[in-house]
Structures are given as C-alpha cells and as structure tokens.
Image (cartoon, rainbow, N blue to C red):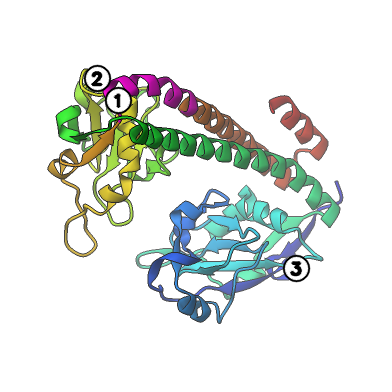
Amino acid sequence: MSEWIETTIGDVATVFDGPHATPKKTETGPWFLSISSLDKGRLNLAESAHVAEDDFAKWTRRVTPQEGDVLFSYETRLGEAALMPEGIRACLGRRMGILRPKRDAVDPKFLLYTYLGPEFQETIAARRIHGATVDRIPLVSLPTWPIRLPGLAGQQAVVAVLGALDDKIVVNERIAATARQLALTTFVQATVDGEPVEVDVASVSRVLTRGIAPKYSESSDDLVVLNQKCIRDGRVRLAPARLTLREKVKAPKLLQRNDVLVNSTGVGTLGRVARWTSDDAATVDSHITIVRFEEAAVDPVCAGFAILRAQPEIEAMGEGSTGQTELRRTQLGGLEITLPNMAAQQQLRPKLDALEERADQALAESGALTTLRDKLLPQLMSGRLRVKDAEKIVEDNT
C-alpha cells in the first residue's frame, strides 16, 4: 500500500452544518434524515421520516445531501456516521453535519471508514466539547482535526476489502426482508383463500404481560434483557440489549420461541412488533409486552404474523400526555386479529417457518460478517494489516 500521510479533515473534505430546527413530518415525500438514521456506519431509512416538498425546498437551502457525503452526528450520538447513497432525495435534521469529500484527495467510502476508525474516534473523544446536557463536536474547528490516509490507490484497495463485506451484509439483509415480505404475503393470502376467523389477542394468549424492571449486570453469565431499541423492522436486534440478574426473573417472563414482543411505551417506538425466534435465554424490560399464545387455541407462528400485520393499528393505540405514550395490556388484549381457520394454520405453519429460518440464517451470516468487518477496520485504517492479508481473511470467511 502507498505511504500514509498526515493531513486534516479540511484538506480532504468540506464541512457543512444541517438546519437548526425540525420540519413537520409526513407519510410520503423526500426523506428526512436524523441522528436516529445513523446505524453503525450505515444509513437506516427504517428509522427515517419524510417531509413535504415545500419543507424540503426550505430545509435544503443551506445544503442538500449528495451521493458520497459522509453524514454524521455532531451532538449526542458522537462518532456515528453513514454514507449518503445514490438515488434518494433527503434533507438533514438538527445535530446532523456533512463531510463532503474532495474527490481528488479522498475516496468517500474511505473517508467514512476513517471517521469510524479507532484513531478518529479517539480524536472525537479528546476534542469534543462538554456541554451542560450534551457533548458536541465543534464544527468550526473540525476542519483542523488530523487524519491519516494513503494515496487514492491505497484507499481504494482498503475500500474494496471492507466494501465487499458491507455489500454482502446488504445482500443478506435484502434476503431477510424479502423472505419476511413473502411470508406476510403468504399469510394474508391464506386468510383470503379460506374461511378466516377473527379473535382478540387476550382470548388466544396464555401470557400477556409486561417485562421486568431490570437490575443491570456486567457479568456475561447473567441474562440478556431486551429493550425498545432491540425491536425494529419486525425483528429483534440484540446489539442494544443489556444484561440483568438471572435469579430475579420469574418463569413467565423468560422468553420462549414464537413469543411476540410489542413495544408498549415511548414516542416513536410504541407499537413496534417482533417475533422471538430463538431458544436462547432472554427476557424483556417493562417497556415491552410479551404475548405468548395458547397453542391449543391458535398456531403461535400464524398468530405472530397476524400481530405483525396489525402493527400500524397497534401504533395508533398509544395514550398519554405530550411526549409520553402508553399501550395498556387491556388495549393490546382487545386487539382483534384475523387468522386462517385452524386446519389452514397447520398447513401454513411449515411454509412460514421455512421462510423465517431462511431470513434468520441470512441475518446470522450478516452478524458474523459485521463482526469480521469491525475487526478488520481498525487494523486496515491504521496500516497495521496489509490489504493482501485482509483479502485472504475475507476469502477464508465468506
């Protein structure tokens, strides 16, 4: 790889600041990207909203995100960043900034990997400003912050290795999303083709309960406890989970395969639904409701898909004062869901299980690839690992 040089952010990129207010959100229109859209180096549109065309025009007077821009948070979630993809129109929310690469000096993806790498993360930790309530990156001085990088050819070699892993992760997530959508379509078609039945959730559940008030632990021997951030896109993500003392959790609140988990408090998170498809030991905190079905009354997989399908209705059930929402168990228990008849459920179950297993396999592979990428990234970005050696490691693991 070519020789690495010391330079600054301002030498390789232009820094832009996003707006200092928040527009009204809409159901359709150009994307509105907030710090919640930044997800470990990737842009998560599932956590993004939309704005009207008029607001888009107003909010992009200062700066319009372009393909290849590195979007980052300069308050609260410091260190988070993502690359602006091609083909979407978007404006930025508060606390969002842009690094616009100078293409003759830096590859956009390499700039993103540099930002996420350990050296620059240490720079953020050392140079951030400590405020009364939140820490922030001072945008005025950011262009003077130091970074190290090789020439463009060396940058592109690093990007090829890490980008191959990122591309495979994206493919796997598309496989999982397609499998889930096919499963939902298959479920809905089964309710149309046969003689559907309507039941309320409480009548077919043997457990309908909130989770625990956890006593958090740092011991790896203790129990995984899921929180609201773990439930997203209809699935459980373990990365935001914590640990709690195992002996304090009663049996009904230990998760079982095919339980349905429903976020039951919080603005923006209430009503999100996921199926628990693991046999691993875990529980949930008190912001999540566990629905465990009575198998004599209903097939738990089919019933789980019925609740997934009803997520928009559940999201609309919140009650409470401004900034606080609450989904009572009685509300969730009273939710009416539509199912195929029992004979059709039994025929449908193997098809849904097969599709969910395919999705779980793809996501498990993505998890392993993400771990590998995160292990290689700091070594490549510091120059300690040669690209050829990294290519061999990737080849052996994919």
Q: Residue at x 61, y 51 (%)?
A: 116
Q: Residue at x 30, y 38 (%)?
A: 307
Vertical order, 346 against 118 (above or below): above
Q: Nearer the viewer, residue 248 or 146?
A: 248
Q: Main secondary structure of the magenta part?
A: helix
Q: Residue at x 54, y 48 (%)?
A: 40
In the rendered image, the quadrant that contains the C terminus is top right
Q: CA distance from mark 2 to mark 3?
A: 60 Å
Question: In which quarter of the view is residue 5 placed?
Answer: bottom right
Mark 1: secondary structure: helix
Instruction: Locate residue 88, reporting x and y percent.
Output: 59, 62
Along the horizontal axis of the image, is 288 left or right of 7?
Answer: left
Q: Give the number of the disc on residue 300.
A: 1
**Which residue corresponds to mark 2?**
295
Q: Residue at x 33, y 23 (%)?
A: 344
Q: Nearer the viewer, residue 380 or 301?
A: 301
Mark 2 vs 3, N-terminal side: 3
Mark 2: secondary structure: loop
For residue 207: magenta?
Answer: no
For residue 341: magenta?
Answer: yes
**Which residue corresponds to mark 3?**
102
Tag 2 near tag 1, CB within 8 Å? yes
Instruction: Locate residue 119, reporting x and y percent.
Output: 64, 51
Mark 2 vs 1, N-terminal side: 2
Q: CA distance from mark 1 to mark 3?
A: 54 Å
Question: In which quarter of the view is residue 82 placed?
Answer: bottom right
Q: Write down the region rendered in magenta.
A: 340-355
Residue 283 in sight from this viewpoint: no
Tag 1 near tag 3, CB within 8 Å? no
Please state which of the two labelled residues, at mark 2 or mark 3, is closer to the viewer.
Answer: 2
Vertical order, 278 against 126 (above or below): above
The amino acid pointed to by label 3 is Lys
